[in-house]
Image (cartoon, rainbow, N blue to C red):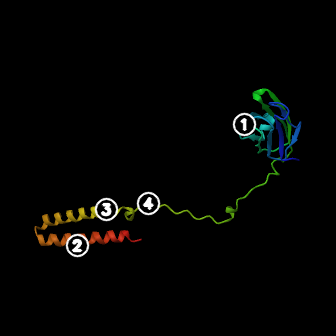
Amino acid sequence: MPDSLPVHLNRTDIHSLEVPKEFDATGSFDVQLHNHGEALHVHLHLDDSLSSVASLDATNHHVRAETDRLVRVTVDGDGPVRGKLKVVTGYGAETRYIDIFIPEGGTENEPVIVDDDLSKPQPKPATESEPGLQDLPLGPVLAAGGFTVLIAGLITLVLTGNVLLTVGAVLAVTILVGLLSVAVRLP
């Protein structure tokens, strides 16, 4: 059985159609539109019984002059089904019907294409973690540290009234904030 259904367009006259009377499909197949003349539009339609097991991506097709065009009929159901494929040119000027037969198990002969990439182990996705202090830019971290040192110095000065003790507290807090910002930046 052929895997494509030949349809000849414009071979004898403008908008002329030459189609086989019937076609046996063992699965999905191509309608091969052979245009022997000027550009034209072709309309394809599956009747109700065929459309219960098969489908077309699009029904209207522009076929350029002197070219061929393939239109895929995807069989995704199971037969046996007998129906008609309607082929129309010239916006209804010419119409032909092709009897299509899809036997029982019509989709069993479809090849299954497996991509080679599926046989390779897939990488594990990186786990998303909450952003931490190390993700902050250095400027805001240092500004927060400087503000902390200033507040610590003012509190010490107010509570003790001793300038020497205040300078020592500010120095200690500054060293502590600096060590923390370096520790945060280490991987």
In the picture shown, does residue 175 fall above or below 94?
below
The residue that appears at 57% across and 64% down in the rendered structure is: 124
Residue 88 image point, x, y percent: 79, 31
Q: Which mark is residue 32?
A: none
Query: How far is mark 4 from mark 3, CA to CA?
Result: 20 Å
Name the residue that disc number 4 marks: 130
Give the residue type that dot 3 points to: Gly
Q: Quadrant of residue 172?
A: bottom left
Q: Pointer 2 and pointer 3: residues touching (CB < 8 Å)?
A: no
Left or right relative to 159: residue 49: right
Residue 6 image point, x, y percent: 84, 41
Give the residue type that dot 1 points to: His
Residue mark closest to the camera, 1 vs 2: 1
Q: Pointer 4 and pointer 3: residues touching (CB < 8 Å)?
A: no
Q: Which mark is residue 139?
A: 3
Give the residue type that dot 4 points to: Glu
Query: How far is mark 1 from mark 2, CA to CA?
Result: 82 Å
Query: How far is mark 1 from mark 4, CA to CA?
Result: 54 Å
Of the image marks 2 and 3, the number of the one nearer the N terminus:
3
Q: Which mark is residue 172?
A: 2
